[in-house]
Image (spheres, helix red, strand yellow):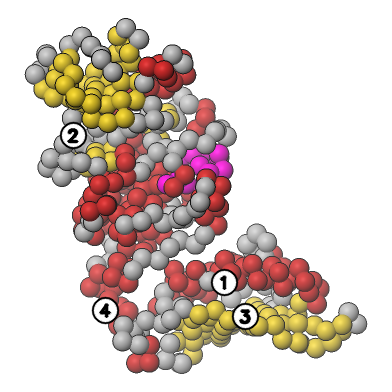
Amino acid sequence: MAIRLPGYRITERLGKGGMAHVFLATQHSFERQVAIKILTPSLALEPSFAERFMQEARTVASLNHPHIVPVYDVGEHEGYYYLSMEYVTGGSLKQRIRDGIEPREAENVLRQLAGALDYAGLHGFIHRDVKPDNVMFRADGSALLMDFGIAANMLRDNSVTATNSIMGTPKYMSPEQHRSQPLTPQSDLYSLGCVFYEMLTGKPPYHGEDTSAMAQAHLREPIPLLPVTLRHYQPILRQLLAKAPADRPESGAALVEALDHLESPEHYTRERARYRPQEAGINGTLAPRLRLKETKAGMSWRGNLYQYDIYLVADDFEQFQSHFPVLRSALQDWHQQRGSRCKGITIKATLHPWISGRVKQYLKELRQSEGLEFLGRLPILLNLVAADGQPIERLAWEPDSESS
């Protein structure tokens, strides 16, 4: 691609994306190296692509933040649409993930990107394509959020506040993005959560063979658990990867505040040690387990009545939640098969006392969740037991009762 642009001397091609080529060039007026992004000529013939490309230029040029790539110039010359921006030499986040990132470095990158998204959100912009490929590093190691090619202005773009077409990268898209629902800054924070998980583990949180399977994974699968050595970051991931936008941090600033109050790995280990049973194993962890059994519970004029017995073991709250895709499906199948002959449910949960309150609240709210409303019509006996066999709490929820 032999290109001449006024005011620049193009020296080499740096790369190629779906919509544009990126070149290294020298800007004559300042004698500085810049990266020039030029819209692919075939796409430039399509007004919609040219407009989207120029939208990126206008978007980024209006944002001034230390972790958003600065745009120096934008224009069109002899059919070539281009923008020039800072030439970044520290490589991409994708490369760093491949090489391996220390947890503290991953947290630092998370903080920087959260600040960038907070600034963009305050100025009315949603990025819509936060992913490792779109994060680059300066030579000093600071991260830059790149590629606002599909960013949207919440103040003027109706496609953000109304139902819109799917745009983004499925591996990192929020549930509402996969559903083509209205987007908010929390949608970018979900994508950032996917990136953070990948920084910590080397792989994205969800997998799918195609776009449809990937969408179902983001919509249905539980939040994945981090390795035990990184488990102190689990509360942050639980917030970022929440299925509902309202359950995520309100902004990038709120995320940074949550990181500031995050328990240290040492404190997390000490808290776990307080409840570590002797029989739980060398690492003091409980092996996850779920056992389901139907038993007869009497007779009626309709025939046999049935009770559903649930026994589960969980080492922490996220592990407890991980049982529920299977449990939910089993309960729905049981109700579909037995109908009005469902008599009641017993639940015995073996877990650490420090998560018992959250477990109790989760189970209580489960009775009002979509597809399991029938649970509110059944008596439920809940028995919470510590890992050493000591009782924690016994509860009996009567049909349609909202009290605990």
Closer to the eye: label 2 or 1: 2
Alpha-carbon distance for marks 3 and 4? 33 Å
Q: Work out whether mark 2 precedes mark 1 in sequence or the reverse, and give the earlier one.
A: 2
Q: Rounded to the nearest whole Å, what is the CA distance between mark 1 and mark 3?
A: 16 Å
**In the rendered structure, which amino acid carries the disc numbered 4?**
Arg
- Residue tagged 3: 292
Work out how far the residue at label 1 is from the one at label 4, CA to CA, in angstroms.
27 Å
Label 4: how many residues lie within 10 Å, few (<14), some (14-19) or many (20+)? Answer: few
Taking 46 as reference, is 391 above or below it? below
**Residue identified by numbered label 2:** 88
Out of 195 and 24, give the one closest to the viewer: 24
What distance separates the C-alpha of mark 2 from that of mark 1? Answer: 50 Å
- Which contiguous range is marked in magenta? 172-185
Name the N-terminal-most of marks 2 and 4: 2
The reply to whether the C-beta atoms of the residues labelled 2 and 4 are less than 8 Å apart is no
In the picture of the structure, the residue carrying the numbered disc 4 is 270
Q: Amino acid at mark 3?
A: Leu
